[in-house]
Image (spheres, rainbow, N blue to C red):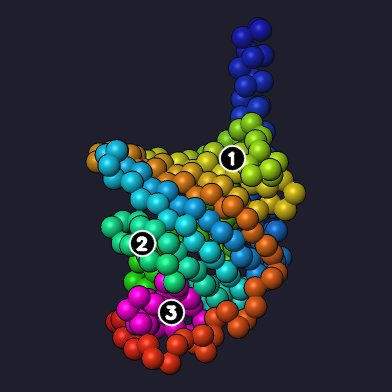
Amino acid sequence: MRQLIIIFLSFANAVYAQNNGRDVLQKVASSMHSRQSLSYDITFLVKSSEETDTSKLTAHVEMLRVAEDSVMGGKVWLSPVGKVAGLVYAPATFMFYDLKHAYKVRSEYKKILYQDPHITKPYRMFEAIPEAMVWKPFLKTNEIKKLAGGDYIISMLNDTVINQHDCYSIMIKSVKTPTENWLWHINKSDYMLVDWEQWVVDDSGTQYEHFAIRSYQFDKVKNERFSTAQFPVDYTYSEIK
């Protein structure tokens, strides 16, 4: 009888953890959707099974929500420094999307690359920048609601402190693609996703990704950030198709 009670309590705790985790994710989606803009500084690290295959970059990111935009859900500006997937981002490189075009400014070459992301997918412009995790948690909050759905196993882990923020810790595992796991750390005070890790395990080994947000602000981004008026007049243009 005692064993049955223990089994029942374990099952009840597991169900509670799942539901509680889904509730936190729903609150993340609601909190982010209520904000107009978000800016932050982020560090992104990628490691594979081969110890020599490591990439790291830092970036400043700014996002302005525009509900009617069908591509990204709003305007995006980012300035990365470092390397990832063999691509090197020098200082003074920046990229942005103004709802009509995506631009990449390479100051070392005085060159501006641009494309229409409504025709060509925007990852062609942003290349190896992990767009799904850089802006979707804020601009496409339905993506978070999907994680809270039945296709994922949600586990609440012990609370932790990240950069002086008291955080929930949530493990997310895909039912359909069990090779992917995420660990999210969410600020308890405003439900901001401040730190997250991802593991992808397949026949070729394990790839590990870690995103750490060092600082962030809500509702401080100005529309001027996404203007082509910031381009130097002596830079040349090149279209990507």
In the picture, the quarter occupied by the C terminus is bottom left
Mark 1, secondary structure of its residue? strand
Residue most extreme to the bottom: 233
Residue most extreme to the top: 1
**Number of marks in the rendered image:** 3
Work out whether mark 3 precedes mark 1 in sequence or the reverse, and give the earlier one.
Answer: 3
The one of 152 and 118 positioned closer to us in this rendering: 118
The spot of residue 173 in percent (x, y) is 48, 40
Residues at marks 3 and 2, CA–CA distance in whole angstroms: 15 Å
Residue contact at pointers 2 and 1, CB within 8 angstroms: no
Vertically, is 69 above or below 199? below
State which region is magenta.
93-121
Left or right side of 193 for 110: left
Vertically, is 241 above or below 41? below
Number of other residues with Cα within 10 Å of mark 3, as a class: few under 14, some 14 to 19, many 20 or more: many
The spot of residue 9 in percent (x, y) is 66, 20
Let me know if residue 105 is in the magenta part. yes
The spot of residue 141 in percent (x, y) is 59, 61
- Label 2 vs label 1, nearer the camera: 2
Judging by the rendered image, the residue that carries numbered circle 2 is 128
Residue 112 figure quarter: bottom left
Kindly identify which numbered label has been placed on residue 170: 1
Judging by the rendered image, the residue that carries numbered circle 3 is 102
